[in-house]
Amino acid sequence: MGAAGACSIPTVLFSPRSVGKLNSNQILTVTPRIALSADQILASTAESLGAVEKEKDKKVLEEKEKRRINCWNEYLEQSKELIKPDGGPPRWFSPLECAFRLDNSPLLLFLPGIDGVGLGLISHHQKLGRIFDIWCLHIPVADRTSFTDIVKIVERTVKSEYQRSPNRPIYLVGESLGACVALAVAARNPDIDLVLILANPATSFSRSNLQLLTPLLEALPDPLSPGLPNILRSMAGESLKRVLDNVVQGLPLQNTTEELVKDLTTFSLSLPVLADILPKETLEWKLQMLKSASAYAQSRLYAIKAQTLILCSGNDQLLPSHLEGERLLNLLPKAKCELRKFDDSGHFLFLEGSVDLVTIIKGTSYYRRGKYHDYASDFIPPTPDEARKIIESNSLFNLVASAVMLSTLEDGTIVKGLAGIPLEGPVLFVGYHMLLGLEKIPLVSRIFLERNILIRGIAHPMMFMRSKTGKMPEISSYDNFRIMGAVPVAPANFFKLFSSKAHMLLYPGGMREALHRKGEEYKLFWPEQSEFVRMAARFGAKIVPFGAVGEDDLGQVVFDYDDLVKIPYFRTEIESLTSEVTQLRGDVGGEVANQQVHMPLILPKVPGRFYYYFGKPLETKGRKQELRDKEKSHEFYLQVKSEVERCIAYLKLKRESDPYRSIGPRLLYQVTHGFESEVPTFEI
């Protein structure tokens, strides 16, 4: 079976300022009254696009900061009730927002950081509560339970719940100190099915600035202790060093402390609450606990077998989390460990506002309700907000591609738009893979936006496996595809998706088409024998053949596989990369089996336009017995292939009469009519 997304796909292929240049003397006559050079059009459009992008970026930053402040305010407001002294020991609580969830949802235990309140996931409760049974650990401010005893508390809960539901995983989500607890519990219970999600784990404590805070606390007089949370928040290496230098020299601390407090903006009003959460004595105790927790977890990493997801911040001022994430990734079982980086985030990752834990879990395919992740039953469709963000991340590419989409009604009429796309599944879209698989981006976006249909891409397994050598694209680059429903190609996944009446996207040519050679544009490389017909007929699925053209308007392959293998270095690299990924069609001959992993050298062109033509849906309903016959199914298979080739030929011919095929007239139209407007095309 073919694979969608057989290689790394750049989100943006061309930018307005590097879109390629026409001869400045060339005139593009768009209307009788308008005549501009290509350079003028592109320069004007680039300026307009730049202004639009800047305005979008500004709004995104403002919204991000607003969400961050709201998260902190909500956290502090609800913390007021939980931090009231009651003399009780550490205990679990389940947030009220988490009352409704999926059947058979796994248990998620949240293990807090140094604050101990247990509300670190407060902005995530509602979404998490739909797919998990959530318990949060609360450690009272005055509690002095040791680290090992906290580990035992969590361990008892894990063992008890595992006995009740041995076929479901238990998720341990720990931040900072809580991540050390999660690692310790996993090391002590290697036979229990655990999934660890570790945010900025404090296993790096011995290499952090936090360990320098203890002498500062001892030097500070009690009246200054309410300022400690602010110092903790605003502390950077140099500012802390300056404070400690003053301590050592015996200079007054008042001025230096005031300098640190001046930097506070977001948390200035929250000072009383933070001081109650971490008074001086509690902070001293927690710092000692961090030291022992880090050493305990570090010494037991070798025993951990649990599936682990590490989340690390690049702007963590308290711990060297970025480096620690890489270190843990290399120490924990490679087949079960993933890392995601958040370069602009600080230590309190889950209170950032812009970080969505549910989206992260979905993007990494870490959500499961059984022993293994099921790409059909465990799939959680993207929320409108998730889909919007993913589509917007490709907005510039979609703008440049300016896709034209045609579809075919039941009576054979070709229409502009997607009215001919069947709404009821199961539906299998079968088509041609353009260079680098670029056609997927506008295709999936447009069908989702206009028809509210989520297409499940049948993808190459490399999109679901971390590179062993580090030479393959980062697996995180495929997270958005997984959020939008991509599944690895496998007969079992086909069966499950057909059973669930899904809309699926299949490229029988797979990687061989996506990484084709020079002069092979729009040439199909399909297996000689049919692969999908009988499965589709078993479920009465509709098959929609389609063609896509436009790659020859975007880039020119100048150095392909045949050129690369002639050079010993590149030949060795290609062999190494190819051996690293799961090979498909090992028992199939011909060119389609030649799925060598490589990256051809592609020179960009002045961008043309993408065109899609969805042929008339082919029915398999009621033909189950007929298409079980090998010859009949092969005839049907060749019919689908012929339809794809016909669609491609139709588009190649019709696009010649499109007055907006070139980017100049297209962008000028959008400048004058708005970038959200649909650019006209040829007459059908």
Image (tube, grey):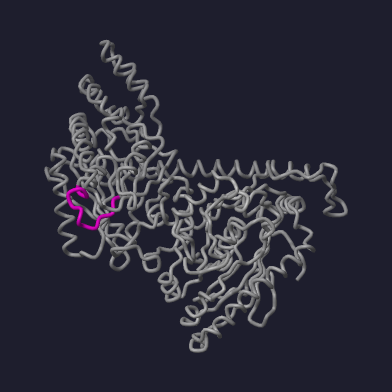
Please identify the quarter of the rendering in which residue 44 is found.
Answer: top right
Bounds of the magenta segment: 185-196
Q: Is residue 560 above or below residue 328?
A: below
Q: Quadrant of the C terminus?
A: bottom right
Horizontally, is 41 left or right of 358 in the view? right
Which residue occupies the foreground of this view, 684 or 305? 305
Horizontally, is 138 left or right of 331 in the view? left
Residue 148 seen anywhere in this rendered image of the structure: yes
Please identify the quarter of the rendering in which residue 292 is found.
Answer: top left
Picture coordinates of residue 541, whole percent (x, y): 51, 79
Horizontally, is 165 left or right of 608 in the view? left
Q: Is residue 186 magenta?
A: yes
The residue drawn where x is 33% and y is 20% is 241
In the picture as drawn, the residue positioned furthest to the right comes out as 32
Which residue occupies the foreground of this view, 667 or 528? 528
The residue drawn where x is 12% and y is 45% is 88
Which residue occupies the foreground of this view, 244 or 165? 165
The residue drawn where x is 15% and y is 37% is 142
Q: Is residue 404 magenta?
A: no
Horizontally, is 368 left or right of 647 in the view? left
